Amino acid sequence: MRGGDRRRTVDVVTTPPQISTLRALKDSGHVQRSVKAEVRENLLARLAAGEPSLPGIVGFGDTVVPEVERALLAGHDMVLLGERGQGKTRLIRTLIGLLDEWTPVIAGSELNEHPFAPVSAWGRGVLARHGEDTPVTWKHRTERYGEKLATPDTSVGDLIGDVDPIKVAEGRTLGDPETVHYGLVPRTNRGIFSVNELPDLAERIQVALLNVLEERDIQVRGYQLRLPLDLLLIASANPEDYTSRGRIITPLKDRFGAEVRTHYPLDLSDEVELVRQEARIAWDDSLFVQGAHPAPLVPDHLVEVIARFTRHVRAAPQVDQRSGVSARFAIAGVETLAAGAVRRAAVTGEPLAVARICDLPAVVPASRGKVEFEDADEGREAEVLGHLLRRATADTFRARLMGADLSALQGKFDEGLTVETGDLVPAAELLRQVGTFPTLAALLGRLEPDSGPEGASAVGLAAAAVEFALEGLHLLRRLAKDDVGGGRTVYGR
């Protein structure tokens, strides 16, 4: 895994159209579309072109993504239902890319009103005063997304709106619609709005969303106010919250057009790809001072160990299956590995930080807070996680090196060799202790087939491969291993 090789897709912002009045907008031939029509047409264009509809979404290609596509094509608002850390919020935010890059709004509108069809008294007033010279500005799609994490203290005013006492104090009457301070939902008019963890909203607050979903308008206190909103509303919920801690009221559930179940990655390859995409420190040098230290490397075989570790933890009977094990568990594990390599490079003066097996033990204490254990196993968290990590390492060794000729390496230990390694032993020192053996290149080729034989990373990757082989031989009971304290380990017979 190489620094900078796998960057996330960034929405490159172009300049907005040079149209600044209603007259010019009409002359341009612009066609007004609803948000759902906009999303539908852009989705169909991607599908017809053979492009991914939701780029960056890993592991959902044959399951969740087709369901989301059908919901969008049907013009449905939807609920994403799944355990924590399954990528629900990431998926929702990816939908922004299905909006038009730029859309026109009446300049100064709080509600992103389209110049062809203002929805507020303010917008209609601007249009009446200025006519064809009504000023037009442009909003980028990234500005057309609103999000609210549902909490028990969320109010109707937060979501929908309330009377603004300051505007009343300025002399407006209570019946004047311009005394209303609009909430997050109307301020996302002509965009996508997400409510995360919807069941955590009090039931009386959920009622406020009924009109938004069915009649597509809002009500604010006793005002004679009707704002026909143009929205795509997406909510997320955890199944445990859905049934126990909170619930989505039946009338609101009925108004969502689709419910989509998410899941953790079904295949190991998807788990690995997800970690590669999301973990920052392993291949994103934005966390490092430019020119001071190159980004660390986490070899692919160690990413696989962490991915297998995560899957073992999810399946472990000691872990509370209702709470799930988030994808952030694996992501944080890889970032911890990278941090261990950076620390070693800083202390020993290595020019390039490359993670090794000796960095794995630090993953256990860093991960404990991300897993809920059954009551009977409280106090045994480190023991259980340590066992599962060793199991994941052994499984990766079998998958990558079973059948490989390691006799030359083992023969050195049969002749009395001992090797000391640890989180403060530099790569060159580890290789010096082991010495050369004829199958080293083949070993590195099995573990890191994409790495070149030369370059700044060659020594670090070779040391990582050798140390992984030593650990695998130990787990198969063909080498002894002693932890001698101070983060040092000795392999021998």
Image (cartoon, helix red, strand yellow):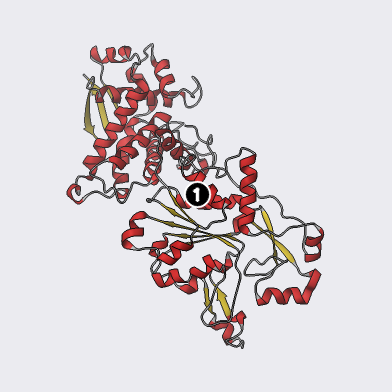
Q: Tell me which residue sits at (40%, 40%) in the image.
A: 339
Q: Where is residue 210 drawn, in percent x and y?
A: 49, 69
Figure check: 272 above or below 111: above
Residue 280 visible in the displayed image: no
Figure check: 448 above or below 167: above
SS under mark 1: helix
Residue farthest along the left direction in this orientation: 376
Judging depth in this view, the residue of 455 and 253 nearest the camera is 253
Total marks shown come to 1
When asked about the image quadrant of residue 396, the answer is top left
Q: Where is residue 441 drawn, in percent x and y?
A: 42, 16
Q: Tell me which residue sits at (65%, 44%) in the image.
A: 45
Judging depth in this view, the residue of 12 and 2 nearest the camera is 12
Q: Is residue 493 left or right of residue 463?
A: left
Figure check: 213 above or below 172: above
Q: Is residue 41 left or right of residue 439?
A: right
Figure check: 128 above or below 87: below
Q: Which residue is mark 1?
A: 91
Residue 144 visible in the displayed image: yes
Q: Tell me which residue sits at (62%, 70%) in the image.
A: 110
Q: Residues within 10 Å of mark 1 (few under 14, many from 20)?
A: many
Q: Where is residue 208 drawn, in percent x and y?
A: 48, 71
- Location of the C terminus by quadrant is top left
Q: Where is residue 178 drawn, in percent x and y?
A: 62, 80
Please state which amino acid type lies under the numbered disc 1: Leu
Q: Is residue 351 left or right of residue 97?
A: left
When asked about the image quadrant of residue 300, the answer is top left
